[in-house]
Amino acid sequence: MRFLPKEEKFFAQFNSQTRAIAQAAVVLAEGVSQGNSQLKLMAPRIEQLEEEADEVLHEVFTRLNQTFITPFDPEDIHSLCSHLDDVMDGLEDVAHRIVSYRIDPIPQPVKEICRLLQECSAEVSKAVEALENMPNIHRHCIEINRLEGQIDTLVRQAIVDLFDNEPNSVQVIKLKEIYDYLESTADACEDVADVLQGIVVKNS
């Protein structure tokens, strides 16, 4: 049973965006788990995926301006793709800052949060894939929200530990910024879930 009107090109573009996000999250998680020097080697791949996702985003917006009948509200398409772009940008920003700030060793909370972001990005991809044919995408959105909550908890605790235990004020500034980017990337995943659930409600 088809959930939304047939317009394969839009759905293919959404899925291209989310596949790039999921791949970038895998690269980031693997990179931080192996240390700064390895992440530095892997970061260009994240940048490449970010550029590919940007190209898809521009294609979607161009198609949106040229298409009279869209699978759901144009405003929701714009919002969905913009929030997906926020997720991708966040992943790239985190990788860039860890490498540029020469964070070595990479703290364990950063590694754990990146692993959760990998899971969260995979759920985002599954939720967007489910959008075309199935109304029941709520379970993926619920899992995104659960993972975002876990990330929030880890970020808050990591920041407390950072201020309590890190004597180097410059390192505190660097890591605090990285934790902020990790949290905002998780928030962007939750924003995607919110848009998807809104689309389901509007079209059910």
Image: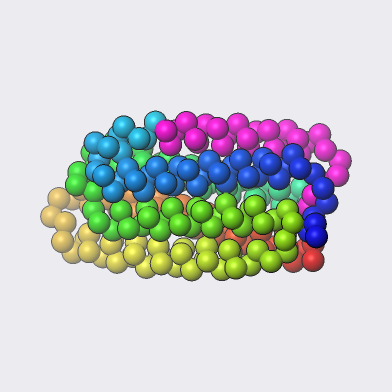
Q: Residue 65 magenta-drawn?
A: yes
Whether residue 123 is visible: yes
Question: Residue pushed farthest front?
Answer: 1
Image position of 50 with respect to 153: above or below: above
Query: 148 or 1, which lies in front?
Result: 1
Residue 180 visible at all: no
72 with respect to 30 (left or right): right
Which residue is at 65% across, 33% downward? 58
Which segment did they paint magenta? 45-72
Residue visible at 30% across and 53% down? 111
Task: State which quarter of the image contains the C terminus.
Answer: bottom right
Tally of marks: 0
State whether the magenta stretch is mostly helix, strand or loop: helix
Q: On screen, 100 above or below 18?
A: above
Tell which of 178 and 169 is nearer to you: 178
Find out whether residue 144 is within the magenta segment. no
Which residue sits furthest left? 167
In the image, taking residue 57 as reference, residue 67 lies left or right, namely: right
Q: Quadrant of residue 166?
A: bottom left
| Residue 44, placed above or below residue 133 | above
Q: Quadrant of the N terminus?
A: bottom right
Residue shown at 61% from the left, 57% from the top: 127
Residue 7 in the image: x percent, y percent?
80, 44
Measured from the top left, where is residue 157 in percent x and y?
29, 66
**Colour scheme:** rainbow
Residue 109 point in image, percent of width and height = 28, 58
- Residue shown at 39% from the left, 31% from the top: 44
